[in-house]
């Protein structure tokens, strides 16, 4: 599609966006947020395109971190760099005492060669697992960074009228190896201690929508590795050994019943997947070992523990019944991302002020996010911001080389995060009555 057809018609959209009536605004700062978000939007777009054209892999976000730090310092925000690796923390003190709220944006790109037809497409390459790969913001983190830089500008302008403190967390390596835990270890959620933490993630849902969910909203992601050990023998005489391939087949089938028969799926979904299996090198030799690698996804911490126990028991018991042995190891990944129910209900009116009926409940998703670690340190709310274009040919899932974000969503993101922060700090989210 030509760049002319893709050109964003922002003018009329902004008129509707910032003039749209909202339910009884009880926070007098809302109008200021909206005005400042509109005023900073061109700069937010510029930042987003620059970051998109210059993506960096996890723990290599030196340029992005430098851009962020320079901007925060220009606003008179206290800045700490090198947090948890390449993370940046900014602390903005309001005009009077109050709570502490944190806003998080992840900065890293993915080892994906961009195929999206935009003038600021990434041409960057980098070393990944020993080979040269393309690098792209295929998950939309460029939008997250630009939005939070815009929020920093808005809130810095308003600081005298905002109580409490805002911490800006620009996090490395969300896509791996994980930057939230190192940032927390370096004190990102302390001094001052954070009372609530918010973040957004872009998704290919329509522009003008924000979705949320109480409780488990994104899954835990744990690596599963099972080694089945039998006894090698001739394929024509299977009784002469113990067949780990046949045993592995039974284990794979058995693992499906962990979810379908041993987990209360009315309470919380779960997934056990074997995505890789290796064993043997000839058709007439039964090998002595089979390796299986997979993933476990759950949306409830208690379910996570249950599934781990049942998977281990199932694999070991089936192997023993066949005269084999199974060694099960589960590599704990990101925990369940849990939106604090009370905080979520408190802040939903803030979201509805921004997008009205476009603020909707989302179903649980089996993707994972290391925002979960921040939400273990303080009540958290993780929302999804729609960036899907009107043209269906431009709508692609996150992590696609064609992923495209409609920039009309940027001011919505700025208003949403700024409003969540201000409404929490003032204790005055709008009423839905």
Image (cartoon, rainbow, N blue to C red):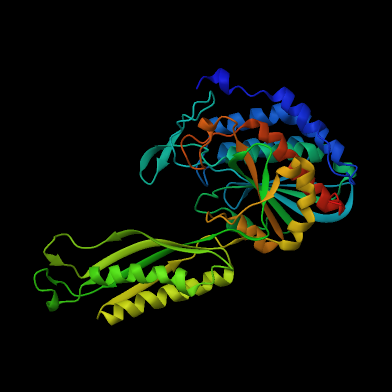
**Which of the 4 image quadrants contains residue 313?**
bottom left
**Vertical placement of residue 53 versus 413, above or below:** above
Q: Residue at x 45, y 75 (%)?
A: 310
Q: Is residue 293 visible?
A: yes
Q: Is residue 54 visible?
A: no
- Residue furthest top as drawn: 4
Residue 414 in percent (x, y) is at 73, 39
Relative side of 94 to 251, left or right: right
Q: Residue at x 49, y 26 (%)?
A: 117
Relative side of 245 to 355, left or right: left
Residue 185 in percent (x, y) is at 62, 60
Residue 333 in percent (x, y) is at 50, 61
Relative side of 41 to 399, left or right: right
Q: Residue at x 54, y 68 (%)?
A: 265
Of 44 and 20, the residue lying toward us: 20
**Which of the 4 image quadrants contains residue 61?**
top right
Residue 246 in percent (x, y) is at 24, 70
**Vertical placement of residue 282 versus 144, above or below:** below
**Vertical placement of residue 19 versus 140, above or below:** above
Q: How many marks?
A: 0
Relative side of 33 to 364, left or right: right
Of 169 and 278, the residue lying toward us: 278
**Which of the 4 image quadrants contains residue 237?**
bottom left
């Amino acid at each position: 599609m030509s760049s002319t057809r893709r050109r964003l018609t922002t003018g009329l959209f902004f008129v509707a966006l910032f003039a749209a009536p909202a339910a009884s605004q009880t926070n007098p700062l809302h109008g200021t947020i909206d005005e400042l978000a509109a005023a900073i939007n061109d700069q937010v777009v510029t930042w987003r395109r620059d970051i998109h054209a210059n993506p960096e892999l996890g723990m290599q976000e030196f340029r992005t971190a430098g851009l962020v730090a320079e901007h925060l310092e220009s606003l008179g925000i206290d800045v700490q760099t090198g947090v948890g690796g390449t993370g940046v923390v900014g602390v903005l003190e309001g005009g009077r005492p109050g709570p502490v709220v944190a806003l998080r944006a992840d900065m890293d790109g993915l080892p994906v060669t961009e195929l999206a037809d935009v003038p600021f497409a990434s041409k960057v390459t980098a070393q990944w697992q020993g080979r040269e790969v393309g690098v792209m913001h295929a998950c939309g983190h460029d939008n997250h960074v630009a939005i939070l830089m815009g929020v920093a500008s808005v809130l810095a302008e308003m600081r005298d009228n905002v109580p409490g403190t805002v911490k800006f967390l620009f996090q490395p390596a969300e896509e791996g190896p994980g930057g939230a835990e190192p940032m927390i270890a370096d004190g990102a959620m302390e001094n001052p201690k954070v009372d609530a933490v918010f973040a957004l993630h872009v998704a290919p849902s329509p522009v003008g929508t924000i979705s949320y969910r109480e409780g488990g909203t994104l899954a835990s992601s744990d690596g599963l590795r099972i080694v089945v050990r039998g006894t090698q023998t001739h394929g024509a005489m299977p009784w002469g050994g113990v067949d780990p391939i046949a045993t592995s087949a039974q284990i794979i089938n058995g693992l499906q019943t962990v979810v379908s028969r041993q987990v209360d799926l009315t309470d919380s979904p779960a997934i056990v997947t074997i995505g890789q299996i290796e064993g043997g090198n000839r058709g007439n030799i039964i090998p002595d070992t089979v390796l299986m690698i997979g993933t476990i996804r759950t949306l409830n911490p208690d379910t996570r523990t249950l599934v781990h126990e049942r998977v281990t028991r199932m694999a070991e018991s089936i192997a023993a019944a066949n005269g084999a042995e199974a060694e099960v190891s589960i590599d704990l990944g990101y925990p369940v991302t849990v939106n604090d129910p009370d905080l979520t209900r408190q802040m939903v009116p803030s979201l509805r002020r921004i997008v009205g009926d476009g603020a909707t409940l989302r179903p649980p998703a089996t993707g994972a996010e290391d925002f979960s670690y921040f939400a273990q340190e303080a009540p958290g709310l993780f929302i999804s911001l729609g960036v899907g274009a009107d043209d269906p040919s431009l709508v692609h899932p996150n992590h696609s080389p064609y992923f495209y974000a409609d920039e009309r969503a940027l001011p919505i993101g700025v208003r949403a995060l700024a409003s969540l922060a201000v409404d929490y700090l003032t204790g005055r989210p709008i009423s839905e009555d």
